[in-house]
Image (cartoon, helix red, strand yellow):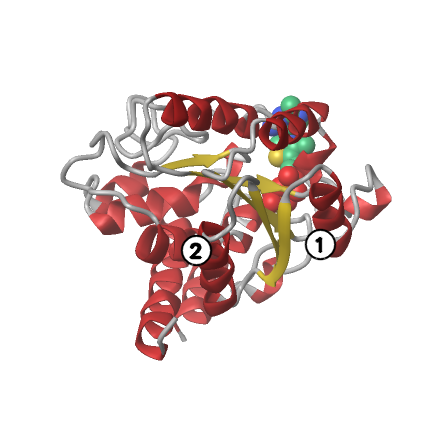
Amino acid sequence: MDKATAEKLRQKAKRIRTGIIEALGLGKPGHLGGSMSAADMVAVLYYYKMNVDPKNPKKPDRDRFIMSKGHSVLGQYAALADLGYYPWEELSRTKTLGGLLQGHPEISTPGIEANTGSLGQGLSLGVGMCLAARRDGAAWRVFVVTGDAELGEGQIWEAATAAANYKLDNLRVLVDANGISAMGRVADRYNVGDADGIAAKFAAFGWNAKVVDGHDVEEIGDALDAADRVKGKPSAIVGRTVKGKGVSFAENTHAYHNKDMSEETRAKALAEING
Ligand SMILES: Cc1ncc(C[n+]2csc(CCOP(=O)(O)OP(=O)(O)O)c2C)c(N)n1
């Protein structure tokens, strides 16, 4: 990836983080932590890797994106707004009755490919979509973002086995390995391992697996490019991340997993993101 592209992606990641704060609004709980930790991966996918067209959200050859950890959709909402799927102003109406953007993704929203929120299901949906693409002789790919605590769901590993069995080289999973769940550390609760341990699990299941710094847009982009060259296997890119990344008082804690913001915390967060 050239330096100019990397710089553009870093700016887009800031824009996404700003949009997350917009979507959280004031005084209503929202999922800041996991949205912020996934923001750089979302930026690389939407502004570097994926073939999507905001003017034609359903174009048949588009790549598909599934936010399997649906609670972290706020960053995806921001990217979709910035790209022009809907006005940026929609973000501030997130989670309002009748609003376009709800707390978890729904396919009624332009650019959203799957209803998620019940953890553990997105990878299975991705496997099905990849099989459909193959059946149709289509070249599009499916990108699924999961959390690390989410990997405690058994359905993930059923999907992982199926993906390897069917040699789905059109499937990519990006794991947001921030080490924190809703109520504490993953290691203290249902320990699926750190980023290296998670990559080893996917490799043992027959996947191409790679650990990256999940906040380094160049590493993420290079790993995604490398995945395009892998034939006969699905790819797992495990991002070592920080929950709440970009907002110091929300980093590395479950306190901002799902929390409201005050005027003061909101102003501080925006200043840190854009400062
Ligand atoms: C099946 C299911 N069980 C429980 C929940 C409640 N829940 C929402 S987010 C979350 C923790 C997710 O942690 P992780 O996957 O690591 O995501 P991140 O830390 O990136 O937010 C839980 C348990 C859920 N949404 N679905």
Element at label 1: helix
Give x and y (percent) for residue 251: 62, 60
In the depicted view, which residue is nearer to us: 209 or 154? 209
Position of 119 compared to 1: left or right?
right
Residue that carries the numbered disc 1 in the rendered image: 195
Residue that carries the numbered disc 2 in the rendered image: 263
Looking at the image, which residue is at 55% across and 24% down?
124
- Find residue 167 and report its image quarter: top right
Give x and y (percent) for residue 63: 33, 39
Above-or-below relation of 192 to 136: below
Q: Earlier in the sequence, mark 2 or mark 1?
A: 1
Q: Residue furthest bottom?
A: 3
Above-or-below relation of 124 to 177: above
Closest to the camera, between mark 2 and mark 1, is 1
Above-or-below relation of 81 to 190: below
CA–CA distance in space, label 2 to label 1: 35 Å
Position of the C terminus, as image quadrant, is bottom left
